[in-house]
Image: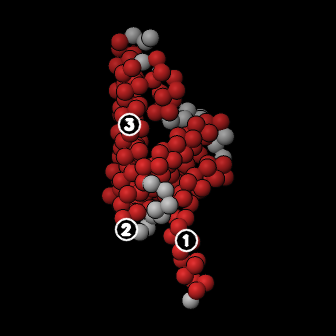
Amino acid sequence: MPSATKRTLYERSLNRYLDQMFRERIHRIESTFPPREAISAFHAEIIKRSLTDQQRRGCLLVNSAIESAPHDAQFLGIVATFLEEVEAFFLRCVSQGQREGTIARAHSAEDLSKSLLGVLLGIRVLARVRPERKLLEGLARPVLGLLDDTIQSRSRRRARTN
């Protein structure tokens, strides 16, 4: 275990990273875009950030989740709490979009939020090994498609009957 000084510095760095890289992004995107577009914009920014990480340092949150959290209850708490914040962002967007009719209701808002979180984490992990646009966008595309599934099907059926 690192010394108290290193541990405190690491904890402050992680919290600052979460504030600047994620909380700021969530606030900015959520206050700028409608729900469906907010989810797409969030994933697009994460993919862009992943592709521009020339040193492949990856995401400090994901790195902490894998390396520190399993062995340190305090870091586990920080990581788990933040992942709940991201999932809550997705849940707010999906729930609002479903109420407005801009996001399909084929799946529950809770399940879609969990899937969006899983894809986000997958993007950040894969980007360390294979930072390829086609791969990362291909990972996000199907889950984003779930948001539109029934809306597009309904539109196609209407177009055929008219």
**Crowd class of label 1 (few under 14; some 14 to 19; many from 20; radius 10 Å):** few
- Indicate whether 72 appears above or below 99: above
Residue at 46% from the left image edge and 33% from the top image edge: 61
* Image quarter in which the N terminus is found: top left
Q: Which amino acid does label 3 sit on?
A: Phe
Give the CA separation, mark 1 to mark 3: 33 Å
Residue depicted at x 54% and y 59%? 146
**Pointer 1: what residue?**
152
- Tag 2's secondary structure? helix
Determine the CA span between mark 2 and mark 3. 27 Å
Q: Residue 114, position in %: x, y?
A: 47, 45
Mark 3, residue position: 82
User: What is the three-letter code of the residue carrying label 1?
Assistant: Gln
Residue 148 visible from this viewpoint: yes
Residue for point 37% across, 46% down: 88
Where does residue 91 sit, x and y in percent of width and height? Answer: 39, 51
Q: In this view, does 107 lie to the left or right of 23?
A: right
